[in-house]
Image: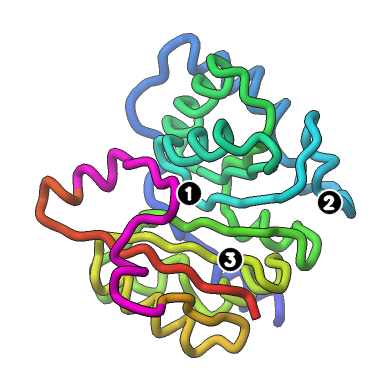
Amino acid sequence: MTEPRRARATEAFYGRRKGKPLRERQATNLETLLPVLKLDVGRPAPATLSELFPVPVERIRLEIGFGGGEHLVHRAAEDPSTGFIGVEPFVNSMAKLLGQIQTRGISNIRLYDDDATQVLDWLPAACLDQIDLLYPDPWPKRKHWKRRFVSTVNLDRIARALRPGGLFCFASDIDSYVNWTLIHCRDHAAFEWTAENAADWLSPFPGWPSTRYEAKARREGRKSAYLTFRRI
């Protein structure tokens, strides 16, 4: 793949970068704690990603666009033997998560505050056990569909980073994006959908904590789909 094509394929997956003014503590965490936890993609990735974490970890999991961080913190707290990498370009969301990490003393999370494709390109091949893409921006207007994170080029990236047998988990309450993802993964040779019946993709993932995005969807009458694809 040429660099110009990759650049065009990775631009503007997210919208605005900042919302309300940060509180003093949040701003301090961004200045002091984020640099400690942030991946340095300007340097080669370690051959063994467990070296990124100050505690022993047996598995590595990436969450793309963690939003308010409820899911990421929940998973990291319930599974301290897994190292988590969370990517989120929205400043307010990052500040909120940093506060939770500090308050709860969580050590098995590393972060990146920009485009997730930069992390996927930086990671060694076949290094991840799971990638989560949960309630991503649906870009509902047809003219914006090219900005959806799920695309052939990004599935190539995800496939490269996942180990054989690793999982790509996707959740959304937008039917058009669910169908979009099913079609793209069906047409990609590296993935197989694990669902055996409707209950498999209409039921939340095991151990799933409800998020504010999911709660909003239910209030507005939208049902969620939970798709799991295995790296062949």
For badge 3, the amino acid type reads Leu
Considering only order in the chain, which callout, 1 or 3, is on the residue closer to the N terminus?
Answer: 1
Q: Do the residues labelled 2 and 1 touch (CB within 8 Å)?
A: no
174, 196: nearer the viewer: 196
Q: In which quarter of the image is the N terminus?
A: bottom right
The residue carrying mark 3 is: 167
Amino acid type indicated by mark 2: Ala
Q: Where is residue 138 in the image (x, y as percent from the top left)?
A: 32, 62
Residue under the point 56% across and 46% down: 87
Q: Please give the residue where the numbered disc 1 appears in the rendered image.
A: 65
Q: What stretch of residues is rendered in magenta?
A: 196-216
Q: In which quarter of the image is residue 127?
A: bottom right
Disc marking residue 45: 2
Q: Left or right: where does residue 216 sit relative to residue 53?
A: left
* Helix, strand or loop under label 2: loop
- Residue 188 vertical placement versus 129 (above, below): below
